[in-house]
Amino acid sequence: MGKISISSGRIYVERAGHSVFDTSARSASLFPDSTRLISSASIVFPHLLLGYCYRTVQLPGDPANTGVCWDTYIPQEWGPQYTDNPATDVRNLPDVFIGSVPTGTDYLDVMVNVTRTVAPHADVDGLPFQTIVPSGVWFKADGGCCVVEHDNLVARMFEFALIGTNVYLRRYQSVGSASISFSGGITNIGNLSNNPGAGFLNAVLGGLVDIRGPHPTGYNRLHGGNNDRANIHNRAYVIPGTSSTSGTFTNTNNYSSTFSCSYIIHPGRINN
Amino acid sequence: MPKTLRATQTGCIIVNGNAATAVALFTNPMLDPANVLFHSDFNYYGVVAKNLSVTINHAAIPGYTAMLNSTIIQGQKVETSYALLYHGLGYIPKYFVSYNGYMLPQGVPIQIDGVKVRYVTAWADASYIYIYDAGFSSDTALAAISLLYKVVVFRNSSAVPGMPMLELNATADRYTFGQGKFQISQEHMRLAALGGDTPFALALGKTTDINHGGVRVVPPGGSALTYGPYGGSFSGSAFQSMTI
């Protein structure tokens, strides 16, 4: 049985002794439906900054010293908080204005439905970067943000950010490093400055560029004994060869991604 | 501060203030939302379904090894969705899902075993709330795991046709504001008196950060979950604990 109490300074409703409405308690409310931002956006993550590495191998039926060349993702950070700096491989990703919400908005209740419409080129494992959230369904994005890809030390994320009374779409992408290490005797491994003898490649092994063509002059050779293996964060590894052939090549691999994102952004307020 | 309730055939409002304030904010509550305690144009988190103890048995992700272009490939991704709760509303509702005493954001690395990882995200359709599971193995399997969730589903916020703007009927035990936007028969998610006494929360800023190819999720009210070589300093955003 319910009960309502209306007195000066308080309106109180209880059910079975449990408060269900109380003007003396704090509450959260979502503003009128007319204030919602409902639309869709194409979220584009740009191509990555690349380096290269190679090894040589004699595949069945091929002459000796044919090459296998991969591109590598060098460590890099992209986001709205950065200013372009080629020396440190950080890049700006500008905010995209989505719309305005009423004065007094404290938080955004965000529902999204994302689908990858342009996949990046296949990674070293033969697949594009893996997505980690469901595709083509609606889910709540707490805090307005969502990591959409995380694979091979590459992460991509978007955010609907409330700044004043404006909502912006923010994009971030990040690439780690030090992911290729050798378990055996290392005789001639270079990092991206082609420094022989370094024990790791300071980048992430990316997609296959060419399996029988030449490798790019001046880049790194994955080189070790017959039992050496170049581990790629323990999920894949290459078996290094023992010699090299240099030349020129064209890399058409493109690691940009595009997501279609439908969204319902409902501004809300916490009354303290 | 006095509280004033005003209702007509077209709307219902409760304000911090006197009758003049109620009249002024009745037609335009956005003039001063801080003093609007209820308005029939606003929307609230009215609970229509819940289960505060749902165990999901997340399956193991088998190990995998293959050769590709003289590269040994280890590990695979397996996607699965598990039904958390049937709501049968016929539309996609708002919902809260918590795990281990804190709110569950999207894309949470909920199980980490070296390079092996399981990400989970709650999602909704017109009938169910689900847990999406993206599991990644290495050459060895990611173990199965049983996890306990709490889920609360909210009705959509539209008015209920035929219900009055205000009904205070002790005989029939009906107390309704704003054509059913508040009903005594329905629980409502409200702000907790103090933070941390409930697993549910509203995030007031982003819950996730990426850096150096790693991911860090800080659930509202929870501890950081970090996967990969994250090199940033994200410690979470402000949040507001909620309770039923």
Image (tube, grey):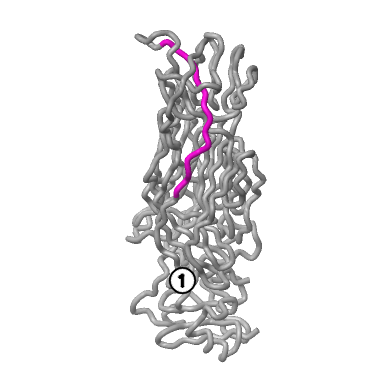
User: Does B45 appear above or below A154?
Assistant: below
**Crowd tier of the residue under label 1, counting other residues whose Cα lies within 10 Å: few below 14, some 14–19, many 20 or above:** some
Counting from the top left corner in percent of width and height, residue A75 is at 59, 35
Quadrant of residue B237 within the rendered picture: bottom right
Furthest residue in direction bottom, as rendered: B20
Quadrant of residue B3 within the rendered picture: bottom right
Q: Magenta stretch: dominant SS?
A: strand
Q: Quadrant of the N terminus of chain B?
A: bottom right
Residue A57 sits inside the magenta stretch: yes
Q: Is residue B150 visible?
A: yes
- According to the image, label 1 marks what residue? A35
Of the pair A68 and B205, the residue shown nearer to us: A68
Using the image, name the chain to which the residue with label 1 belongs: A
Mark 1, secondary structure of its residue: helix
Tag 1: amino acid = Thr
Counting from the top left corner in percent of width and height, residue B12 is at 47, 83
Rendered residue at 41%/19% (across/down): A213
Q: Is residue B71 visible?
A: no
Q: How many numbered marks appear? A: 1
| Residues in magenta, as a range | A44-58
Furthest residue in direction front, as rendered: A248
Counting from the top left corner in percent of width and height, residue A167 is at 52, 62
Quadrant of residue A185 within the rendered picture: top right
Residue B58 sits inside the magenta stretch: no
Of the pair A43 and B105, the residue shown nearer to us: A43
Of the pair B226 and A63, the residue shown nearer to us: A63
